Amino acid sequence: MKIETRLFIYLAPFFVVVGVVYGFWSSWEPVGTACLLLVAGLAAMIGAYLAMTAARIDARPEDDAHGEIEQGAGDQGVYAPWSWWPLVLAGTGAICFLGLAVGWWVFYIGAALGIIGLVGWVFEYSRGVHAH
């Protein structure tokens, strides 16, 4: 995780500098300046999280300069190949964005459906044929 950590850690001061330069050029326009500084904070938080995670886990094959392709072979995680829940969540995300344009009542319907979809996705392996 060395590369990812460095990427986000180096992006944080970059966005601080860009935010300050933008602030000077725009006479401290509040929205753009605040957004750029918040992006710097977000990059710093992600970089800190990746640094803490890299300290807890073993080095990955991607971190080895002399690593071979076959070192990354094997299972990469547990994925549900026939799951319909991501499609439900994408649809509810579209409904929520539609609600921002049309009316808040549509957003609330999308949020309720999104909670149902998220619960279904999280507990997908807790029932039926795939129950553990």
Image: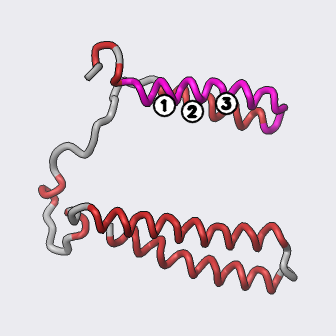
Determine which residue is flagged by label 3. Answer: 111
Q: Residues within 10 Å of mark 2 (few under 14, many from 20)?
A: few
Q: Dot 1: within a 10 Å radius of its alpha carbon, few (fewer than 14), some, or many (20 or more) residues?
A: few
The three-letter code of the residue at mark 1 reads: Pro
Q: Main secondary structure of the magenta part?
A: helix
Residue 28 among magenta residues: no
| CB atoms of marks 3 and 2 within 8 Å | no
Q: Residue at x 16, y 50 (%)?
A: 73
Mark 3 and mark 1 residues within 8 Å of each other at the beta carbon? no
Tell me if 92 is positioned left or right of 54 in this view: right
Q: Residue at the location (55% across, 31% down)?
A: 89
Residue 12: x and y in percent read 55, 76
| Residue 93 horizontal/vertical position (percent) | 63, 35
Quarter of the view holding residue 18: bottom right
Q: Looking at the rendering, in which quadrant would you find the N terminus?
A: bottom left
In this view, the residue in front, 65 or 12, is 12
The amino acid marked with disc number 3 is Ala
In this figure, which residue is indicated by the disc labeled 2?
A: 90
Over which residues does the magenta segment extend?
100-124
Q: Give the amino acid type for the residue marked by disc 2 in the picture.
A: Ala
Q: Position of residue 106 (x, y in %)?
A: 77, 27
**From the viewer's perspective, is residue 76 above or below residue 97?**
below
Q: Is residue 101 magenta?
A: yes
Measuring 64% from the left and 80% from the top, which residue is drawn there? 16
Dot 2: element: helix
Which numbered disc, 3 or 2, marks the residue closer to the eye?
A: 3
| Dot 1 and dot 2 residues touching (CB under 8 Å) | yes
